[in-house]
Amino acid sequence: MAASARIEVTRDVATIVRDSLRPQAGAIDAGLYPEDVLRTLGTAGAYAHHADGSPQGLLAAIEAMTLVGEACLSTAFCVWCQDALVWYLARSEEAGARRMLDAVARGHRIGGTGLSNPMKAFSGIEPLALTATREGGGYRVRGRLPWVSNLAPGHVFAGIFSLPDGRRAMALFEAGADGVAISANARFVALEGTGTYTVMVRDAFVLDSDVIAHDAASFVPTIRNGFVLLQTGMGLGLARGVASLMREDTRGRASAEHLPLGSAAIEDRVAALAARVTTAVQAHGQTDRATFLETLRLRLDVSWLALEAAQSAMLHFGARGYLEGAEAFRRLREAQFVAIVTPSVKHITAELARAP
């Protein structure tokens, strides 16, 4: 994407955040799924930056997500889900998957990532949830995915399934299609408006034209750095939003000036981490473990910043932040999600402990 087009998209995203997203942030936190905002962001080009697979495009996608995350992490998470799906399709060598790319990148088709369980499975944390057999021109798939986000009937998501011979394949599924049922069976303390469902796959037939990779074991290393780096936009955006919240609070700013982590210090750490992201995206195509561990270290540091910044905002606002509906408390709950979404802090620290 040319620099002028990137600037225009950034300006459009900032306008959408200001005019459409911020007024709905409280309702989204209470459970409103922001599909209107997500589609508008797609029309503005927010999901198309990285479809070319370039480091510059990946960085632009992260920056757009950061703008969204400044106002609402629920929506930023949905943006990440959409961006991750674009990333899979863009990196695929399968013609069917690439035919879907334009519709997803423009926000005409909305979808989720579906890779929480597979990413844990590839790390040996839990078994792969979906299994399949080869049948005709596709696969017959069954299993249960506990949480897939950015879904509604007709939305799409990626899934990885194991075959009897030990191979793994990755394909697109449509929520609500034959054999692919979704159900909301839990309420969360935050991010309730993210379209998160349990998915039951009951002998669903997946055509070869919906396959992203017939050999997922070889494909995942080509997408995993981008998958994780894209998540940094959520945490950096939340930290930046928290810093603004603290700085704009003229009522409590003076009495909070001696807290160990104020708005200026948060912004400095955001800038330092953003510089590391700028460097890290240059190596997103590397498939070696050492590069991936560096990506995980960066993602871990973003998680710690989100947690520490949101905690500092709670200390800044004191009792005002402890009231039901307080924005500081919403940001604290959101920051905790940054730390538990796959790969979670627990997952990352386990990976780093067994390095190399």
Image (cartoon, rainbow, N blue to C red):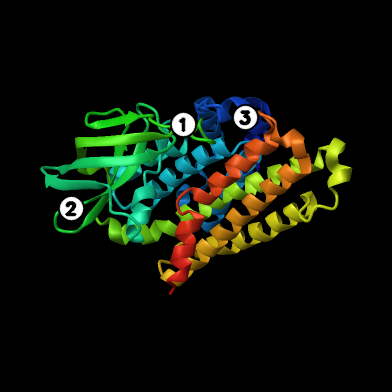
| Residue to which mark 2 is pinned | 163
**Quarter location, residue 104:** top left
**Quarter location, residue 313:** top right
**Quarter location, residue 285:** bottom left
Q: Position of residue 85 (x, y in %)?
A: 41, 44
Relative horizontal placement of residue 180, taking residue 71 as reference (left or right) = left
Amino acid residing under circle 2: Leu
Q: Earlier in the sequence, mark 2 or mark 3?
A: 3
Relative horizontal placement of residue 241, taking residue 40 as reference (left or right) = right
Pick the residue in front: 347 or 79: 347
Relative horizontal placement of residue 305, taking residue 183 as reference (left or right) = right
| Vertical arrangement, residue 277 with respect to residue 207, above or below | below
| Residue to which mark 1 is pinned | 187
| Vertical arrangement, residue 122 with respect to residue 336, above or below | below
Q: Secondary structure at mark 1?
A: loop
Q: Position of residue 207 (x, y in %)?
A: 20, 40
